[in-house]
Amino acid sequence: MAREDDGYPPVWKVHSPQDEPIGADIRDIPFSNPVEFERVARRIPHPAIPALDTLHASRRSFIWISDMRTEDGFTRKEAHDPDGNPVDFGLCVYQFIEQTCFQGDRIPNLDADVNLRQLLDTLDGSEAGYWKAAVVARAYDDSARAFADRLSKNLNYWLPVRLGFDPDDPPTHSTLSRHWQFDEETEAAIEELAIRARYAGLWASAEFPAKLREKGWGREEILSSEVTLEEKLVAMKHLIEEGVAVISPHLSFGRDPDAPAFKLPPAAFLTLFAHLALENSYLNTGTRTLEWMDLPAPVPSPGTVSQYTGALSVEDIDEMFGKATAALLKQEQEQSVSDSADSILDPPVHLAYDTTKVEWYGDRSTPWTSGVLPRDNSASAWVFAVLAIVDRDMSYVLGALPLRSQTEIGEYLRRFLRRATGMYDLDIGRVYLDSELYTETALTALRESDVDFLIQAKDTGAVSDLLDAAVEDEPEYREGVSFGDFPLSRKPNAFAWPVPDEVVGAGNRDRSHEAFLTDMDVKARSLEGLGHEFRARWGVETSIREIKRRYHAKCKSSKPSIRAFYFMMATILYNLSQYVDNRLADRLYTDEIEWSGEELLHATREVRPGGVPDWGGAFDPAEADDWVGLR
C-alpha cells in the first residue's frame, strides 16, 4: 500500500477555508519571507483548481514560483524521502495525486464532466494503487509496457514503493493492462489529472523526461517558446494585484475592512473604473455591462459610487491619492528579491509640472471650470495640475488635481514638491516647466523647495533681448534677468539654447533659439546639455495623454470632487501600468515584451479581490511627514 506522508511537508495538499471553493490558493509553501508567502499563496493557481486553459496561461508563473522557492533554499528534497530524487518527475506526479485526491476533505473539480469523489469512492485498496499508477503513466505519456519497464528500473525505486507495489517484483505490462480497463468517465479523469500533474511538476522544478520535452513541456522548452497573450495577461494580472495590495488600504473611503457591512473591497472600485475606461462608458451603463460579465470582483452600484464619492471633498481625494501613491512608490523602491527590474526611483529623480484641460460640455459658469475656446461642442474645461517623473523609462504621476483658478498653479506645485520630498522621500534632481507656468508663484515654489529647475521662458522683455542677442548655433546667457512684471528681490538667470535641426518642429520656429529661466550657474553649466535635457519634459505630456485617452472614464458630473475622483482613478490605473511595465518582461522570462493600455485594463478587470495579498500595510501615513493640505 502507499505509505503515509512520513512527516514531510505536504506541498500540494489544499488547506482552504471550508466556505471557499477548493483552490483558494492557500498551500503549505515553505518561504523564509512572509511577504513572498503572501504573494504566492494567494495568487499563483494551485494546479488542482482552475480550468486547464488557465493553467496553461499560468505555466510561466509556475516556473517563476519554482525559481523563487529554489532561491529561498527550499527544494523538493524536503518533500520526498531522503533517498528519493528531489526533482524526480514520477515522485512529483505521485505526490500531487496522493495529496490532492486522497489526503484532503475535498478533491479537485475537473473540466471533464466527471464526479471524481464518487469515482474515487468506488476504488478498493488494491485498485487504488493501479489507478494512481495509471495517472502517473499518463503523465509520463507511457504505455503499459513502457511504464512497467520504468517501474522495474532501480532509478525509480521509490515510485513503486509509493504506489504500493513490490519494488523487486513490480507489475508487468500485462498486469497493468488488465487493471487499466477503465470506463469512459474514469479515462477522462485520469487524462485530465495527468495533465494537471505535469503543471505540478513545473511548479516543483521536476526534471521532465525527454518525451515530454519534445512536446513542449519543461522549464527551458516553455521559456524558449513565444509568450502567448493569455500568459501575458496572467502575468499582468498578478503584478496588478501586487500593486493593488499596497494601495488598497488608502482607497477604502475610510471604511473598516473588518466591519460586518464591509462588502466592497477597494479592488472592486478599481476594476469598475478599469471597465468604464475600457468600454468608454458612463457609470450607469458601465455597471450594467460589468454585472453581465460575471467577473470575480463585486460590482459597486451607481448609487454606492455616488454615495461614497459624494461625501468626499477635493482635499479628501487628494489625500487618498497621495497615500496610495506613497504606498506604490515604496513598493517600487523596496522591490522583493524575485523582481530583478532596476529601480526607476534611483536619485536624482527629474520631474515635470504641467496643466491639462478636460473638456466640459455643461454650463460655462460651472465653478472650477475655465473658459476656453469652444471645441467639439464643449463650453469650457476643467484644468488639472499634474506633477510627474520624467527622464526615465517609466513616469509615475506624483500629483494631479483640478485647479479652482489659474492663480493656484504655484500653490499646487509647492504642495506637490513638498509631498515628493517628504511623503514620497524622493531625491529630486531638476523640475521642468513650460512657458504656460511662467509665473512668480511657480518660481517661488521651486525656490522654497530648494530644487534645480528649468522654466521655458516667454519671448518678452529681457528674454526677448537675450534671444535677439543670441548668435546662430551658439548658446547665450544673462544673469539676473527681469521676470515679467514680478518684483522679485532675487532675479533668475536666463540662457538661450540653439535648437538643433533634428528637434521636432525646429524648422517652423520664429526663433533659432529657445530661452529658459533657472537659478543654476549658467556660467559653469553646459547650456547645450541643459537644453537637450529639458526635452525630457515631454514625458509629462505623454503621461497626461495616456491618463486622459486610455484610463479616464466618461464623467458628466459638475462637482469638482467627483471630477477629482475620476481623474484620480485614471491616474492610479496609469501608475499601476508603470509598476507593471517595470516588471512584466522579467516576470515572463523575456528580454522585452510589448503590451497595451487596453490589455492592462482587461487584466485589471479580471483582478480577484481574494487574490490580492495582504502585505500588512506597506505604507503607514502616521510614519510620514505631516500631510500637505490644500490650504
Image (cartoon, rainbow, N blue to C red):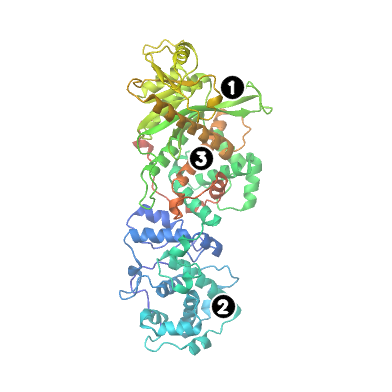
In the picture, the disc for residue 574 is 3
Quadrant where the N terminus sits is bottom left
Judge the density around disc 3: few (<14), some (14-19), many (≥20) Cα neighbours within 10 Å.
Answer: many
The disc, 2 or 3, on the residue closer to the chain's N-terminal end is 2
Percent position (x, y) of residue 586?
43, 52
Given residues 452 and 125, the one toward you in this image is 452
Number of residue marks: 3
Q: Amino acid at mark 3?
A: Tyr
Judge the density around disc 1: few (<14), some (14-19), many (≥20) Cα neighbours within 10 Å.
Answer: many
In the picture, the disc for residue 187 is 2
Query: In the image, is 507 to the left or to the right of 343?
Result: right
The disc, 1 or 3, on the residue closer to the chain's N-terminal end is 1
Given residues 9 and 56, the one toward you in this image is 56
Percent position (x, y) of residue 456?
46, 22
Mark toward the viewer: 1 or 3: 3
**Quadrant in which residue 95 is drawn:** bottom left
Above or below, comparing residue 155 to residue 442 in the picture: below
Query: In the image, is 358 to the left or to the right of 345?
Result: right
Q: In the structure shown, which secondary structural element does the residue marked by tag 1 occupy? A: strand
Q: Amino acid at mark 1?
A: Ser
In the picture, the disc for residue 173 is none
Percent position (x, y) of residue 101?
47, 72
Q: In the structure shown, which secondary structural element does the residue marked by tag 2 occupy? A: helix
Label 1 – label 2 distance at C-alpha:
70 Å
Q: Amino acid at mark 2?
A: Glu
In the picture, the disc for residue 370 is 1
Residue that appears at 64% across and 22% down = 373
Mark toward the viewer: 2 or 3: 3
Mark 1 vs 2: CB contact within 8 A: no
